[in-house]
Amino acid sequence: MHIHSSFKHLFLSLITLIFFSACGGGSSSSSDTSVDVSSRNTMAVQLPEDDSWSAAVEHLNEIRSGMGMIELQDNELLSIAAKNHSLFLTENYGDGIHYGHNEVAGLSHFTGVDAWDRVAYMGYEGFDGENISSGRDTYKAAIDSLMTAIYHRFGLLSLTANEIGGDMTDVDGYEIYVTESGNSRIDDICAEDYTEYPGIYYSGVCTDANKLIPAEVFLTAWYATAAQNPVAMLYPYEDQIGVSAIFENHETPDPLPDITAYTGNPISIVFNEYHVEDVSMVSFKIYDIDGIEITNTRILTQESDPNHRFSTHQYAMFPLDPLTTGTTYSVEASFIVDGEAWEKNWSFTTAN
């Protein structure tokens, strides 16, 4: 007997699909917006000459490498899916009032209601997450702004992603940057036939929603990528320089709904669920350059996250006042990890 459950609906209920509208910025170099969405695999991505997506991937991978994480491989299908959605948003909602992760059938450049469907439309099976940013004039600036927004940061630092694509559209100075993350192992297993495989199955994993993937095969592929990442991921990472001093507080959903002013860039710790089963926080503190503790902070955990997006293994500390530029800060963290004490002291330096 085959026992199966729908993975797509479970996955979309758990994954963070969020939008960050960054204020400021200006017009980026224009890119070709004449993408034919009726063709799945032949569209070419036209990038601005002075600001390439490949440079953005390199920048993101520098961050991930500094944290000890695996690098993401650039995937063209994911980039085209990202381009399609950026076109949908700018062509249909260029006024900036309506935006987000869902599309409406019948409107220009529609390729799928949700991000999962849009990536599947390109023939890619291993969707992992989507991020959107607006109001920045370079890819690098878009990545950096997303890294200050805690829910979006967690998306870019996904433990189960090993590929990423991205693109942007600029219509009359209104820029939309979209990234799509994926897992190549899931993409691969969806090409296999598991008809005779006994046991528990998942449906909704592949583009063909009726195709059944053995739970053992799926989970092995899904967590193989997480296994390559370290026990704990710190951001800002140890000895990182050029870190943004502020969080502009324009993230949706809002992690600080009672605060409208700029705050400091949050410090986060994510424990890898592949390596760690149980974790609890003892203390999480930040100190200025003189060694004086900054006490005006707010710590978000699964229990205190106002939007209920944090997992049991994700923690973030927000300095409620902007950090000082060009300054070194120290962090002390103490946790109980699988019954053992885990302590980490590190420092980072904000950008001038």
Image (cartoon, helix red, strand yellow):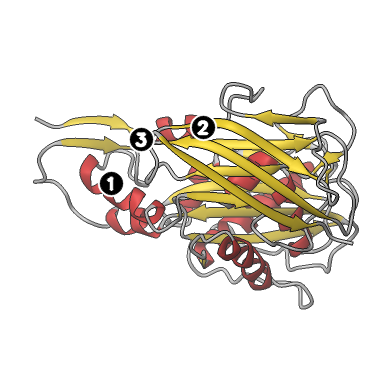
Which of disc 1 and disc 3 is earlier in sequence? 3
Instruction: Name the side, left or right, on which 190 lies relative to 63.
Output: left
Residue 322 visible at all: yes
Residue 292's quadrant in the figure? top right
Residue that mark 1 sits on? 218
Alpha carbons under labels 3 and 2: distance apart:
18 Å
- Which one is nearer the viewer's eye here, 321 or 192? 321
Q: Which labelled disc corresponds to residue 296?
A: none
Instruction: Name the side, left or right, on which 280 lies relative to 327.
Output: left
Q: Position of residue 53 (x, y in %)?
A: 67, 68
Residue that mark 2 sits on? 311
Secondary structure beneath label 2: loop
Mark 1 Cα-neighbour bin, 10 Å: few <14, some 14–19, many ≥20: some
Say which amino acid is labelled 2: Ser
- Which one is nearer the viewer's eye here, 118 or 200? 200
Which of disc 2 and disc 3 is earlier in sequence? 3
Say which amino acid is labelled 3: Phe
Q: Position of residue 202 (x, y in %)?
A: 27, 37
Residue that mark 3 sits on? 7
Indicate which label's residue lies in the foreground, 3 or 2.
2
Residue 213 visible at all: no
Q: Are dots 3 and 2 in contact, CB under 8 Å?
A: no
Q: Residue at x 68, y 41 (%)?
A: 150
Residue 1's quadrant in the figure? top left
Say which amino acid is labelled 1: Phe
Q: Residue furthest bottom?
A: 49
Q: Residue furthest front?
A: 291
Q: Are dots 3 and 1 in contact, CB under 8 Å?
A: yes
Q: Position of residue 299 (x, y in %)?
A: 68, 30
- Which one is nearer the viewer's eye here, 289 or 235? 289
Q: Position of residue 265 (x, y in %)?
A: 78, 45
Alpha carbons under labels 3 and 1: distance apart:
10 Å
